[in-house]
Amino acid sequence: MTGDVLGWLRELARLVVPVVCAGCGVPDELCCPRCAALLDGAPRRVETAAPRLDRLDGVPPLPVWALVDYTGAVRHLVVAWKDRGRLDLDRLLAGRLRRAAATVASSVGSVAASSGTVTGRVPGRPPPVLVVPAPSTAAARRVRGREPVRVLAQAVARGLTDAGVPAVVAPVLRRRGRARDQVGLGSRARGRNLAASVAVRSRALERTPRGVCLLVDDVLTTGATVAAAERALDAAGAEVVGALVVAATPPPDTRRLAMRPTSLTLCTDPTRWG
């Protein structure tokens, strides 16, 4: 199919289903440059702001890296991608997380190279890092028609490999029981909801090369999902070295400062509206 035909089909699709920026609502943009730029920062450590990652035993919480705060346009963008069918945002989010993975690869790779818990190692060659996506509930999979976090996990594995740290996607976790989706739940409710509801797919783990695990999710809120995943993998004998997410809910004080009267910030630059 020629480029002219593809261009014509894209224009026709825009007429039938108008495209707006998922972050701010400006028309004729999948994600406008201003909103996309919010994801351009270097990944930073955010685990201290997630109360459910505090083990309360003196052991430091699991390291978690995030690109940006889960507020404003970023929140709208992630919700549109995950829950409103905006598959056209896969490339944007996956690309940013791939780049972030390359940035944290040295931290992950050093643990992978020194891990003494791996069996069947080739001398001088560390096993691949296992990039483990956070599991969705069965109900969420039915509604969405897929597990969007796996798209992010694939990007993270590529990013680690780009930086010289071999990695493979390992979807070895599952949700069991009647745990509901986490959207809208507070810190305590998330903890109760996920208690014992994340389990390891034993056969899948047995078929996977043993290496250290890096968890991947879209958003870090209270840390309940990451904590439950870490416990399940630890119980199965796997070593979790950290987690990488697109965005993290900021601490309460920061969140209050970021609040605005409206829930959606529209682009006010008239030159962007044609």
Image (cartoon, helix red, strand yellow):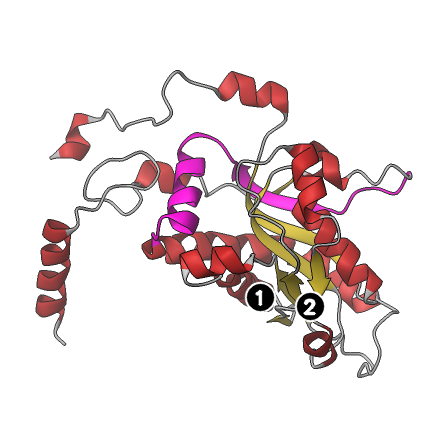
Going by the picture, which residue comes out furthest to the right?
A: 57
**What residue appears at the point 64 percent right and 72 percent down from the top-left corner?**
166
**What residue appears at the point 41 percent right and 48 percent down from the top-left corner?**
83
Q: Which residues are magenta?
A: 58-86
Residue 207 placement (x, y as % from top left)? 70, 81
Compare residues 32 and 102 and report the one nearer the observer: 32
Is 84 above or below relative to 199? above
**Badge 2: few (under 14), some or many (20 or more) residues near its Cα, within 10 Å?**
many
- State the quadrant of the N terminus: bottom left
User: What residue sits right under mark 1 in the picture?
Assistant: 157
Q: Dot 2: what SS?
A: strand
The answer to whether marks 1 and 2 mark residues whose Cβ atoms lie closer than 8 Å is yes
Q: Dot 1: what SS?
A: helix
Is 213 above or below relative to 223? below
Q: Amino acid at mark 1?
A: Ala
Is 53 above or below relative to 3? above
Is residue 63 shown in magenta? yes
User: What residue sits right under mark 2 in the picture?
Assistant: 129
Residue 25 lies left or right of residue 132; in this view the side is: left
Residue 245 placement (x, y as % from top left)? 58, 48
Residue 266 lies left or right of residue 138; in this view the side is: left
Compare residues 31 and 80 and report the one nearer the observer: 80
